[in-house]
Image (cartoon, rainbow, N blue to C red):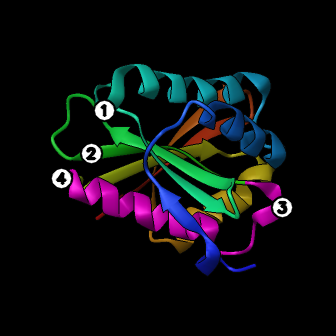
Amino acid sequence: MKSAHIKYRSTVESADSDRIRRIVDSSGFFNPEEAEVAVELVGERLIKGEKSGYFFIFAEMEERTVGYACFGPIAGTQCSFDLYWIAVDQDFRGQRIGKDLLKKSEEAMRAMNGHRIYVETSSRNQYEPTRNFYINNGYLLEATLKDFYAPGDSKYIYFREI
């Protein structure tokens, strides 16, 4: 299956909490606390709407949510956004879904007057494909916070101007 058969939506549904948990759990990258945060953001959006500051794009194939991105404006800035989450179900990786979600997220941020996007990830070896994904999509390493997540696990912050 190719990403051409994928539909994208930006509306958030109550069932998205379970869908996001399934996607995040399928990756094997995130611990239970991180997965809970991903799910909580859906709840915030459902309760507060756009005022929550969380915006989503979901990728769906044959009525199954196979990936998503979550982003929002950074409080106190004029045109900077955080890309909080971008994840694709393990069974659907390698089909450009992540790249398409990233591009659609960037377009949405630009439409909201976004000019700079920041994204963070871990320095652990497991995250090398993630770091390469951002680099291959035009993101530059802006900062490293040594031992941020744990001893030997630094936070890498990437950015891109759009």
Q: Which residue is mark 4?
A: 113
Among numbered discs 1 and 4, the one appearing first in the sequence? 1
Q: Position of residue 80 (x, y in %)?
A: 27, 45
Q: Which residue is at the far front?
A: 63
Among numbered discs 1 and 3, the one appearing first in the sequence? 1
Would you say 70 lies left or right of 48 here? Answer: right
Residue type at numbered disc 4? Asn
Label number found at residue 80: 2
Q: Where does the magenta region start and end?
A: 89-112
Label 1 packing within 10 angstroms: few (<14), some (14-19), many (20+): few
Q: Which residue is mark 1?
A: 50
Measured Cα–Cα span from mark 2 to mark 4: 9 Å
Q: Mark 2 touching mark 1, by CB under 8 A?
A: no
Seen from the viewer's position, the closer of residues 39 and 118 is 39
Q: Nearer the viewer, mark 4 or mark 3?
A: 3
Q: Position of residue 73 (x, y in %)?
A: 30, 39
Measured Cα–Cα span from mark 3 to mark 2: 32 Å
